[in-house]
Structure formats: C-alpha cells, structure tokens
Image: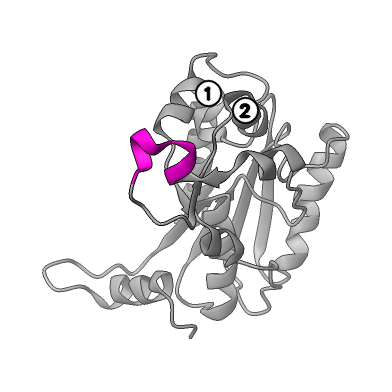
Amino acid sequence: MQDNFTEQLLVKLRQGIAGLLSFDKIIYVGHSFGSALGNHVAKDSPSAVDAYVLTGYSSTVALPINLTLDFFSAAIANPARFSGIPLGYWAGQIEPVRAATFYAGCFEPAIPHLDLLEHDTFAVGEGLSPGLEPRVKSFTGPVFVVTGDLDILFCPPRGAAACLDALEQTGHLFPLADFSVRMLESTGHTLGLHRSAPAMMAEVHDWLDVYF
C-alpha cells in the first residue's frame, strides 16, 4: 500500500480508531482533485473502499490557459488574507476568470463572488501530486461518476453528447468495476453550488441505496 494519509486513514476507519466504532462499509466521495485522489486509492488499495462517488471528474482533463494565469502566490495576490504563508501556496485573484472556470448554466449569481472571497489556497506540489490518472485493474465494486455538462475542466467544449461520451470513456480506468455515470444539465464544475445540487445529492443517495 502506498504510504499516504488518505490510505492510512481508511485503514484506521476499517480497523477502528480508539474511542470510535470501526466501519465495515466505506464510501469514498470526492470532488475534482479529491476524485483524482480516489482513483489512486482504488489502484493502490482496492480493498480500502467499498464504493466510489467521483464528482466533477472524468479521464478527459483540460486546464484553461486563463485559469493557469490567474493563480498566483496567495501571500502576494491577497496579503490581507494570506500574509505570512509560504510563497508556494497559491490562490486565484481575478473574479471573472474564477467564475467562468467553475460556474456555468444555472446557479445563483451571487455565489461566484462569495466563492472568491472565501476560497482557500492550494500548494503547487498538491496540484501536481495526482499525476496521470492510473488504470484501476483490481477494484470490482461500484463507481459512480457525476459531472456537469458545462464543466470546462472535465468535459470537452463540444456539447452534451461529447461530454457524456467523455464520462462514459472514463470507465476504461475501472475495467472491473460496476461503473455508471450521470451528466448533470446546465451545471459547471463546482456542481455542489449549482441549482442542480439538491437533485444530484438525492440521486447519489438513491444510487448508494441500490448497493447498500
């Protein structure tokens, strides 16, 4: 097993942590970067998790050039919030760029501004750490990929049919899994902050009910 925090935590949850119950069923729910990490967990430790819900994710990844230009050392870009933290921690600085990257379709117009005000930093090494998405050869449980049709990071900008095809093609990363996808309409990358979120969450729970 790869020696990393996520997998060590999952082992502890399965075995039991002092003062807490052990868990015989573990569902991994990730979004974007978290979904990529889940892909690696499934490869490195197939028995650590019973099912995966991977949102804002596919095997087709695009990084818009305006987004890469927007991120800058947080302590310099926003010293009022991030003064004193190491220069290797970055944050976004241009609201229209962040809004266009993470939001599309149906969402409350006030949310992107609040998102910019409250968003946190990420480390340069953290952003590079997942690397290429590996093929998971041994995991045989259920995997549910849920991504918005207007997600410019993980869906090709060629319409809903191309997006759905990209999501379905992600199944090649999990050849032995019980793999299924859901493409959310009028939804961008930060799908939990779009108007489709309540229905999406209900659908995920319905999907889990089938297996557990």
Residue at the farthest top position: 109
Per the rendered image, the range of residues in magenta is 75-83
Q: Earlier in the sequence, mark 2 or mark 1?
A: 2
Asked whether 79 or 158 is in front, the reply is: 79
Q: Quadrant of the C terminus?
A: bottom left
> Callout 2 environment at 10 Å: few (<14), some (14 to 19), or many (20+)?
many
Asked whether 79 or 131 is in front, the reply is: 79
Residue at (54% x, 33% y) in the render: 93
**Circle 2 sits on which residue?**
103
Residue 192 at x, y = what percent? 50, 34
Give residue 196's quadrant in the image.
top right
Residue 199 at x, y = what percent? 53, 28
Asked whether 203 or 39 is in front, the reply is: 39
Residue 112 marker: 1
Residue 166 at x, y = what percent? 80, 49
Say whether residue 153 is magenta: no
| Left or right for 61, reference 84 | right
Give residue 6's quadrant in the image.
bottom left
Secondary element at image label 2? loop
| Left or right for 13, reference 180 | left
Majority SS type along the magenta span: helix
Give residue 17's quadrant in the image.
bottom left
- Distance between mark 2 and mark 1 Cα atoms: 7 Å
Q: Amino acid at mark 1?
A: Pro
Say whether residue 79 is magenta: yes
Q: Check if mark 2's residue and mark 1's residue have beta carbons within 8 Å.
A: yes
> Callout 1 environment at 10 Å: few (<14), some (14 to 19), or many (20+)?
some
Q: Amino acid at mark 2?
A: Tyr
| Left or right for 53, reference 4 | right
| Picture layout, residue 60 above or below residue 51 | above
Residue 46 marker: none
Asked whether 196 or 194 is in front, the reply is: 194
